[in-house]
Amino acid sequence: MSTAPPAAPPRRTRRRRRDWTGLVFVTPFLAVFTIGIVAPLVYASGLSLFRDQLIGGRSFVGLGNYADALTDARFLEGLSRVALFLGVQVPIMIGLALLAALILDSGRVRAMRFMRIGIFMPYAVPSVVAALMWGFMYGDQFGLVAQLNEATGLALPSPLSSTWVLAAIGNVVTWEFVGYNMLILYAALRAVPEELYEAAAIDGAGEVRVALSIKIPALRPALWVATLFSIIGSFQLFNEPNVLQSLAPAAISTYFTPNMYAYQLAFNANQVTYSAAVAVLLGGITVVVAYVAQRLTERGNRR
């Protein structure tokens, strides 16, 4: 005699309970995401559709502010400067971080913990403090460069001149973030299976061969993450040039980067709505560049 299995609870009831449980876990994230990310974006996007006028007050202009920004020589100059900074500084920084991670992972470095902390330590220094510190060393009238000129009788090129100031800012940013990117790459290297190293040792591969054939290919996802963060950080360039501007006002203008231009418009020129349009436009350009870089990386990985 067979017995019928107990009736299963209604599917709709079980699904509702599971959905409510998941919602409890994601609610804190959704609340923070909405308040910290979505609300400012919506507010800035809405603000950018208006224009403040001396006569008539605030009026709706649609995409007029965006059209003005796309032909604004100051915005375009800052954007081209950031693009140059991105194209030169990011490969140098990622290359140095990769080299440091490979050296530390080789196990042939003495005092490895000290080296690891020493390379990472600049990231713990606030960017404003780092810019002040390097600004003092860059000074050709009061800082390290001035002391070297006085001691040697030479006239070294001033890092705060209009010719070298972008490279000087790139040096500060590289000094700050090499350790951060090195830590991402070093953590990824520690996850490489030991069997691959053992197989390479059996084949007689040296350190350079192992790095080129095993470690660097395994680092592609981590390299992409580090590059993505660096692209976004380049478009957000603000603290370093803003601090150094007081030391080199002739070389660093108020529109040196798009972020500095948006700040100048909002807090000094009282053009809040146009500043919002510049900020939203810069955010959109950053998303497009990051997406294109991601697509190119995925295409390269499939080959």
Image (spheres, grey):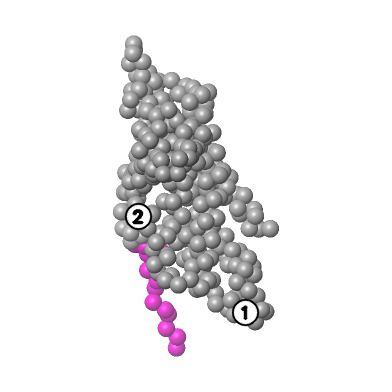
Magenta segment includes 208: no
Q: Residue at x 54, y 50 (%)?
A: 92
Estimate the x, y position of residue 46 in percent, counting from the top left.
39, 30
- Judged from the image, the secondary structure of the residue bearing numbered disc 2 is helix
Contact (Cβ within 8 Å) of mark 1 with mark 2? no
Magenta segment includes 14: yes
Q: Which mark is residue 201?
A: 1
Q: Is 272 located above or below residue 87 in the figure?
A: above
Q: Is 180 located above or below residue 8 in the figure?
A: above
- Residue 240 occupies which quadrant of the picture? top left
Q: Which mark is residue 193?
A: none
- Left or right of 221? Residue 44 is left
What residue is shown with label 2? 124
- Left or right of 247? Residue 82 is right
Q: Is 5 located above or below residue 159 in the figure?
A: below
Q: Residue at x 31, y 58 (%)?
A: 24
